[in-house]
Structures are given as C-alpha cells and as structure tokens.
Amino acid sequence: MKQIGILGGSFNPIHQGHLIVAQGIFDEFHLDKILLLPNKYNPFKSSNEDNHQCIEMLNLIKENNSIFDIDLRETIGNEKNYTYNTIKSLISENPDNKYYFIIGSDIIEKLKNWYKIDQLLQMIPFIVVERPGYPISFEILNDLKRKYNANFLIYNGSNVDISSTTIRNKRFLNKSIKYLTPDEIINFIEDNNLYLKKEDQIKQFKKQLKKELKPKRFEHSINVMNTAVELAERFDIDIQKAEIAGLLHDCAKSLSFEEMVQLADKYNFKIPSEFYENPSTLHAIIGQLLAQLNYGIKDPEILSSIAKHTTGDVQMSKLDKIIFLADYIEPLRSQPGVEEVRELAKQDLNKAVFKAMDNNLNYLRKNNYPINKTTEKAWKFLKDNE
C-alpha cells in the first residue's frame, strides 16, 4: 500500500512555499508520493483561466524531484471540479492506496461550504498546514470531528510566507522574484513573459473611459485605480485585477438612472428592489454589466468588486474590500473620518472596511437618506466577525 499526500491548487505559479511544505509533509508522515493536483475551475472563484503554462511549470518541478506525481483530472472539461468527486475517483481507481488531503489553515473556516463535506471528511484524512496569519482554529476542527468523525493531522513544520500572488505582483511591478520560486520556474516565467503589466490594455481602457466620464469623475477613477494598486500590494492581492477594477469601478457613472434601468432591461439583468430605493448606488451593479459589454471584462472577481464598491456585501472577497476601500480613501476624498480609515488601511483591511462602512451609514442616518439593505447586512456581518 502506498501513502500519498494530495496537494491541490492553481499553482500559478508553483513556488518555494509549496515545495517546502510538500517535502516536509513527505518526510514527517513517511509518504511515498506527493500528488500535485492543479485545478482549472475553482467552485468558489468561478475561474476559467487556461492553465497549460502552470502545468508546464509543474512538469519542470517533477523532472527534478522524484517525490512528485501530477494528476490533471481537474484541468479537463468545462465543469467545475469538486474535491469530493476527485477523491472518490482516486480511491476507486487505486483502492490499495492511502490518501491524505493537504490544506492550509486559511481553508478551515470554508470547509463547511465544500460540496459533500460530510462524506469527504469520512473518506480521507486531512493534513492541516498552519499558514502565517491564519492560526489553526481547533474549535472548528473539533466540531467537524464530532459531527463527521473526521481525522485531522497537524503539520507545524513550515512558516514560509510566500504566495503565488506575491510572485505575480512582483512581476507586475517589475521587481525580482529571485529565491521565491526555483530557478527553472523563474526562467520559464521570464522566457514566456508571464505576469507582466498589460500596458496597452490599461492605456486603451483609460482612453475609452476618459470619453465617457466627466473630468472630475475620470480623475477620481484614476485615483481609485492607483489607491487600489497600493492596497493590493500591501495585502497581497492580485494587483492587475485591482488596477482594472479600480479604473472601471465607476464606468456606468455617466448614465442616468433611466438609462441604467433600460440597459438592464435590454440584457435581462435583474436589478434588486433595494436599488430602486437607493438610485445613487445603482451605477455599481450596472457597472459590472458595462465592464463586460464595453471593456470585455470576464473575470468574475473584477466584476464582483465593481458591483459591490458602493454597498459592500456579506460575502466580500479581498478584492471586493480593496475596491470598496480605495473608493472611500482615494486622495480626493475629504469627508469626516477619512483620515482614520486611511490609517487603518495601513494595517488591517477588515477594520478599515468596517470603519468606512460605519461612517457611511452614520452619514446616511444623520441626513435621513435611504440606506441600502445590502449595506446594513454587510455592516452587521463585519461587526459580528471583528
């Protein structure tokens, strides 16, 4: 019987953090192989990026390290992949093998939302790796153990704080990625011009946007873009996505309320009822439609951050929070309380977003302006999870 650890992810790109953790787990748990499981479709990100270059990089790693095998089943086809289905098929194909599924401590709180998590936890033990900034929640793990008879093993052997996002951001900013990933991966990235800033695309977006917005609104959009880039680098969020989302967040601002409603009707885009009560926030959700129609944006994370930049939401990604915050603190803003939020934004993304949202709600209440229900729910969620 072979003992095999499964390490999944986008590996965009694979880096030293992946390799150090994989080698450490291989040694500590006396495994026979580490199975690298690249994914193409993440059920929680709705991503559909082509990843053939990521697979080529994994093959370069495999050539130089015999502990690795690669399984490509989650990169095939057009359906979203669920870990439950992958593990079930692996066990069915290799019933004599003992599998362990490796996750980071940042995933623990999301496990309850995984497809058929009750059955998955009974099928395979999980090895939990503590990631910097994400202490292991033993309360959640113990609860899952009681509910599903789950088996969690803890690996404490690594404290390497490297992410694929960091590497992509450094390339975007024309900074060195030396020592963050093996030399053969650096050479591949450089030879294929990966993760570089798409200057022509941004230039075209700016040119088009300048025609559509009033000068002050265009200046605001440029400021939000620059602020979003700063925040993205600070909080290790994809800078290229932040730049595009920040630039286009107000792309629907030139339309009247009636024009936005007409556009939504034309494309069968359903407007939630609360936006009719709060017309000043409608440009955000119509903005995501215009970003697709006029700028060709397909990335769901960028579109989400445009849609949520005025109201926030209970479910906000880091990019959603970045654009919401950048819109609030960009240099032209001078509203009461903005300096405090700017200071918070240097240290804690969640606290800064909550304070900005709290300030907005207080202003609306003070002036008897209507409040979007989505914002109230988002504020309560952030307050309850401080």
Image: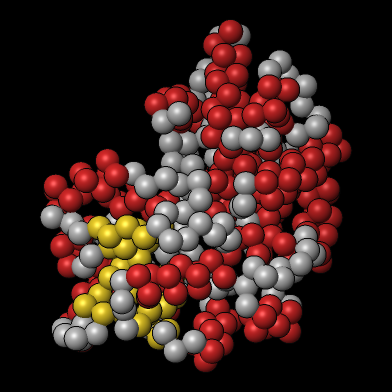
Residue in the picture at 67% in, 70% down: 179
**Residue 274 screen position, x and y as percent:** 46, 29
Q: Quadrant of residue 165?
A: bottom right
Give the vertical position of 261 relative to 67 (above or below): above
Where does residue 331 sit, x and y in percent of width and height?
80, 32
For the N terminus, the quadrant is bottom left
Q: Is residue 349 visible?
A: yes
Instruction: Locate residue 232 relative to residue 85 in the image: left or right.
Output: right
Q: From the viewer's perspective, is residue 170 above or below residue 357? A: below
> Which residue corresponds to the image point at 32% horizontal and 83% vertical from the top-left?
32
Residue at the image position 63 percent from the left and 35 percent from the top: 347
Q: Can see residue 214? A: no
Q: Quadrant of residue 255?
A: top right
Quadrant containing the C terminus is top left
Q: Can you give x and y, in whole percent of width and height, for residue 317 in the image? A: 51, 46
Determine which quarter of the picture holds residue 171.
bottom right
Instruction: Say which of 47 and 136 sits in front.
Output: 136
Whole-percent x, y for residue 86 in the image: 28, 74
